[in-house]
Image (cartoon, helix red, strand yellow):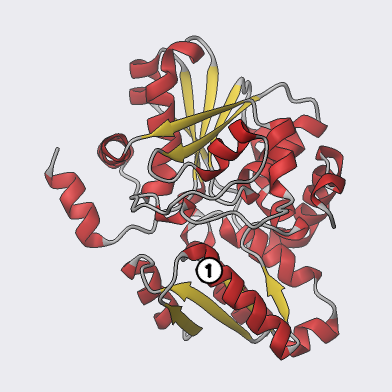
Amino acid sequence: MTASAFTADGVAREVRAADARIRPHIRETPLEYSPILSRDTGCDVFLKLENTQVTGSFKARGAFNKLLSLTESERARGVVTASTGNHALATVHALAVLGIAGEIFLPRSASPVKIAGLELRGAGLHLVDADPGMVEIIARRHAEDSGRVYISPYNDPQIIGGQGTIAIELLRQAVRMDAVFVPVGGGGLIAGIAGYLAANNAGAHVVGCQPETSPIMARSMEAGRLIELPNADTLSDATAGLVEPGAITFPICQSCVAEWVLASEDELRAAIRLVVAHHSVLIEGAAALPVAALLRSAARYRGQSVVLVLSGSHIATGALAGILSAS
């Protein structure tokens, strides 16, 4: 499928199909009111707790949907995927549940807690000394050479459809939803949510959130084309890395995402401390992006009902200890 052919209506069809497929394998995650963020921003703020999803992130939705969409022949050959961690954890879990073989390519710089989780699950793991974008290229070539299906962590209709099932839940759970803040790496999560909401005329203002140190999709929106930027370290490791040329997420982001907000590393650390202290739930750097982005742009949303998608829970204990000790 070409990028231009994947419209909001196409996303909505994939999301509806995914919702029917994956329900036996995932959780409908809670939508929790945040008194502290509501007070501090003047909004009615709700947290979509995807950090409590199966395997600790929203990625289980897309992984199950993609694997359940494979033909019997494709399942028999096995799959190859690349990830910075969360997609790998979700895929390994789904492979085990469905009885499919697979290999996982991961940058050696990935979060130690994610690598440890993969090793614990017995993943067929390849650690590569390269940035996330190059790891994807290496994994795709390996899949082609071995005759197996390559599963992109974001650039795939079924992956996007699976992630977009969050939007179905939000429309069911939220009495009112003026804005939705979503963390963005390759764009699979936000394309699924924003595309489905747009196709259903939900009227929600979708905000893409990225770290200042790795704002590739936000800067690509400004440029009107996918661009490359140097990779810099960020606490939001799950959103780091390049976006594939021709990614089908890009036009959906162009047409369905209303605004882009960047957050600093200090803002991400402060957001993690706030959520841990006031909600007693664990979030990783990427999940802190919507919190930090709302706090930065709160004046524009005063009086509105705002949903923040907290995408995952995997953070290294050392990093977490350092963040909490600085409070």
Q: Is residue 97 left or right of residue 148?
A: left
Could you say where residue 313 lies in the image, as x and y percent from the top left? 40, 54
**Callout 1 amino acid:** Met
Answer left or right for 116 relative to 57: left
Rendered residue at 84%/86% (across/down): 73
**Is 11 placed left or right of 243 in the picture?**
right
Residue occupied by mark 1: 134
Residue at figure coordinates x 54%, y 55% from the top left: 242
What x and y, as percent, mark residue 292? 38, 32
The vertical placement of 302 against 318, above or below, is above
Quarter of the image for residue 195 reads top right
Find residue 74 and report its image quarter: bottom right
SS category of the residue bearing label 1: helix
Q: Is residue 164 above or below residue 98?
A: above
Front-most of residues 48 and 131: 131
Name the quadrant of the N terminus.
bottom right
Q: Position of residue 8 (x, y in %)?
A: 81, 38
Residue 45 appears in the picture as rendered: yes
Which sits in the foreground, 225 or 322? 225
Q: Is residue 289 above or below residue 187?
A: above
